[in-house]
Image: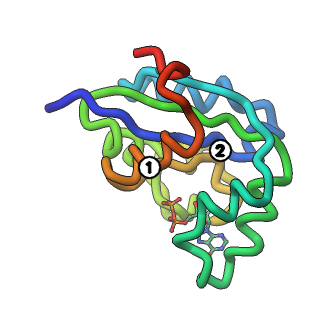
Amino acid sequence: MAVTRTFSIIKPDATRRNLTGAVTKMLEEAGLRVVASKRIHMTREQAEGFYAVHKERPFFGELVDFMISEPVVVQVLEGEDAVQKNRDVMGATNPADAAEGTIRKTHALSIGENSVHGSDSDENAAIEIRHFFNDDEIVG
Ligand code: IDP
């Protein structure tokens, strides 16, 4: 299995509750390595651009308002099959459907305030990483 990268966001509901370390620990224990990390307060433009794929969905406005409500921690994660590994440890979008031991089952508050984002493909991971990080900020 190839070592690849994925993009992660620790969302405002988690940073607000001081769970950055707890979430990162779960990512690391799943076999992912944090090779870049920064805490930012997203602008509305950044959040709308990042979630542009969802702009026709009914929850788009709510999602953007949430993502800019508090700081987030954006990270690049590296590991074998990183995209899938991260999706596995994140759990289902709705914490009510998430498996035991996943980040969302453990920490998420609702389908919207669900603690973490993770890229859904290698292609999107590359796009999302470029959205937030320069090459010299990623130290593998
Ligand atoms: P994912 O984050 O598990 O990949 P997506 O379907 O891509 O899930 O949705 C992106 C984000 O939009 C979710 O993580 C969640 O924060 C938000 N979201 C998805 N569905 C709903 C909803 O029905 N109500 C409110 N927010 C939602």
Is residue 56 shown left or right of residue 120?
right
Nearer to the camera, 64 or 23? 64
Q: Which mark is residue 4?
A: none
Residue found at the far top of this picture? 139
Is residue 121 shown left or right of residue 9?
left
Mark 2 residue element: helix
- Find residue 88 and report its horizontal and vertical position in percent: 37, 46
Distance of mark 2 from mark 1, alpha carbons?
27 Å
Q: Quadrant of the C terminus?
A: top left
Q: Which mark is residue 107?
A: 2
Residue found at the far left of this picture? 1
Q: Is residue 124 above or below residue 40?
A: below
Provide the residue designation for mark 1: 127
Residue appearing at x 59%, y 47% in the figure: 116
Residue appearing at x 54%, y 30% in the figure: 134
Where, by quadrant of the figure, is residue 109 drawn? bottom right
